[in-house]
Each structure stands twice: as C-alpha cells, then as structure tokens.
Image (cartoon, coloured by chain):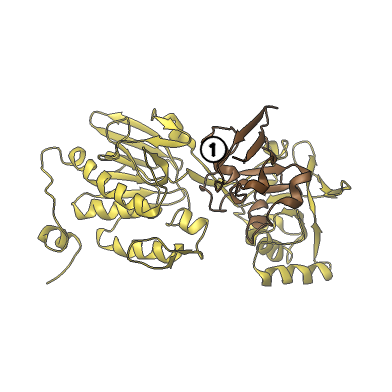
Amino acid sequence: MNKTDVLIIGAGPTGLFCAHQLGIIGLSCEIVDNLDKAGGQCIELYPDKPIYDIPAIPECTGEELTSNLLNQIKPFNVKFHFNERVEKLNKIKDRWHVKTSGKKEFDVASIVIAGGVGSFEPRKFPVKECEKFEGKNLFYSIKDKSIFKNKEISIFGGGDSALDWAIELSNISKVNLIHRRDGFSGAESSVQKVKELNDKNKINLYTKYQMKSLSGDNKINAVTIRHEDGETKEIKTDYVLGFFGLIMQLGPILDWGLNINKKTVEVNTENFETNINGIFAIGDICSYPGKLKLILSGFHEGALAARGCFKYAKPDEKLRFEFTTTSKAAQERLGIKK
Amino acid sequence: MPKITYNTHDNKTHTIDVQKGLSVMEGAVQNDIPGIDADCGGGMACATCHVYVNEEWLDKLPKKEDGEEDMLDMAFEPKKNSRLSCQLIVSDELDGLIVNIPSKQC
C-alpha cells in the first residue's frame, strides 16, 4: 500500500504543476499515468510542435514543456507510477483507497483527476471480428518480437510505428504492410526504406487497401483487404498488427459517481472539487462556466486544487498564504540553500 | 447564416444555421449533434471529428492542410470523402454543405 497525501491521476502538464503546488504547501503526492512516461497529450500528440501560449515562455515544444515541469518538481521527489490506470476508488473513513489496473494500491487523503480527455488506448480496427482475435494473433502493440520469427505478418497503418515495425520485422519474418493511401505520415527516411525493401521483395507493400475481413476459427489464418476501387485480395497470415495511434477514453472514471457532462467532470471554481468531497478535477477533464482548455488554465486550476487538498491531508492545521520569494518554509521544501 | 446539414448515423438529418467563422465541428458540438467527439478541441490532433462529405461538395471545399490526411489515417473507417470537420470553416461558400457522421469516432 502506498500512503501519501494526494494521488494525482495523469502526468500531463496540469498534473505535474499540481504536484509542484502541493509540494510548495508541504503536501506529498504520487502520480499515476496510463502512458509509459510523463507529458500526457503534449508528449503523445505533439511532442515536436511548438506551443506559443505558456506565460513568459514565447515558444516551446511539448517535450520541452514536460521536461521543464519535471525539473521544477525535482525537489519534491514525486513518485510516478506509469503504465497504470486507476480502476477503483473506495472511501474508508476519511481516506480514499485506490486500486490500479496493475493491482497497485494507494491510501490517500484526496485525489486530483488531471486526466486530460481520458487515458490513452490503442485505436482499434473497425472490422468487428477483430475483437475475438485480439491478444491471440492480433495485436496493437508488440511486447515480444521473437514470436514473429519465420511467420507471415500483416501490418496495418502508415505512421512511424507501422513503418518501424515493418522494417524491423522484415529481418525475421515475411511482412505485408497495408495502408489506406500512397502517402505515409511516418518519417521520410522510413518511407524510403520501406519502398526499398518492397523493391527487394523483403516487404509486400499494399497501398490504397484497408482491411475488409478476417478468416479463421480460433486464430486468424487469412486477412482480406479491399482496394479503394473495390478489388479484394486474400492474404495468408499468421499475425495481424494494427498501428493507428492512440485514442483517449474516459474509462473507469465514468463509474465513480462524478457529475459528468460531455466527457468532462463538473467542478466548482473555488477549489476545483467535484461533487464528491475529496475528489478534485483539473485541466482538460474539468468543466465549469467559461472553461478554456488551455495549459495555463490547468496550472491555475492545479494551484487552487492543491490548496483544496490541504484540509483533507492536514485537518488540524491552517494553511497560510505565502510567496515562494519570501517563504522560508517553501524555500526549504524546494531545497534552496542560502 | 450558412446552413450545414449533418446526417447522423441513426438516419436523422439535422440542418443547422451555423455562424460564419465557426468550424463545421463547432457547429455540431454547440448544437448537440451526436457523433462528433472532437476530443482535442479542434487542434487536428485526434481524428474524432471525422465526417464523410457528400461527393458533390468534395471539390468545393478548401484543400486539406498538411497533417489532416495524416490524422485521417487514424480515423474510424476513413474513405476518399473523409474530412476532419474541425478543419472546415463555415462561410457563404459552404452554405448547403452536407456531411455524414460515421457510426463511431473510434
């Protein structure tokens, strides 16, 4: 059981800055995120794209913003739990017991949901029968590539993951790469490499094709693809891989009894608490009149939610407002030596 | 105001006056037309405002910017007439536009 004052759900910029604000006022926190690293949408959707509206930072990328925020919270030694999704919340007396998908447990005074638009999950094939083969010989990510040795693999997608895996697996397996158009969104060097491998018959490239259906009983043994002109082809295959990026799903948050409106959680604007005492929501996931889905709004919301958490973590103490420029306590927490 | 028609997957037709300057996505979201999620809020970063444009409108629309086609790779069942509705800005030229909302966005 991990015992801490506050559990933050989501390691995007809003969650990270909230951890900073909690640290400044002397509360401890841990952060859970479904991705394998910090940064949330900034890292997953636009790591290289510039952001121009962070106050006092004329321009930075999602990646730079994330690494600066991580630097800023370094003094607080915040513990991260990646690849974990929060599943269950239970109120036990005046504490919350939280369980994650990986069976981690937390005992906390309050919870801050900074979950963006939900947790990132792989986008799946639209073809219905894919579901029953998922995890058998149809995958959306690769954990152990050795299972593909000397097999015939059909990879769908045109982004970096699809191209990189097609190139990588072409060394040990027979690879079909199927994509809905001639253009690819992956790196130009990978596109060139795939075309070379196609010329050398190391990869069979099918463009302007999409999946039509699968055949097989327990496992897929063939996939039928359809050209945009209607022509179909059946390809024998041992494995099917789909790389269509990630989609955001609210997931278990829907079951916690929160007031939810259009995939967002309603909060008050005094301290960003939800309809449930001790559960706060900040960033893109919260809604209130006038809400702007900007990173800077998330920072403000995190600062107020952190103060809202104080009375649950330290019910017998009074929180005094202080500036970091002059507060000895805050500077000690930041590890500043004079 | 230009009229935009949204055909939803439940076979209903919604014709809405949408203010010039809003996107076709915003027109749908503000009028509670089901089936447009727009998770990223219009940043061409998620492909959950995907629509099929009626054929006769395809050539009349502004061309896709870099990045829209890349995002459409991620959409649910993309077709030749697929567009991201956040990238279609309503103007007098788009008066009468008909878009079909797919059965799912993901």
Chain A colour as displayed: yellow
Judge by depth and name the residue closer to the eye, A159 or B97.
B97
Q: Which residue appears farthest toward the right when viewing the image?
A: A231
| Label 1: element kind | helix
Residue topped by disc 1: B29
Q: Is residue A97 left or right of residue A329?
A: right
Q: Give x and y (percent) for residue A149.
A: 72, 59
Query: Which chain gets the brown colouring?
Result: B
Image quarter in which the N terminus of chain B is found? top right
Judge by depth and name the residue closer to the eye, A227 or A167.
A227
Chain at numbered mark 1:
B
Q: Quadrant of residue B37?
A: top right
Residue drawn at 72 percent across, 54 percent down: A155
Q: Give x and y (percent) for residue A174.
A: 79, 60
**One can see residue B104 in this view:** no
Q: Give x and y (percent) for residue A194.
A: 74, 67
Image quarter in which the C terminus of chain B is found? top right
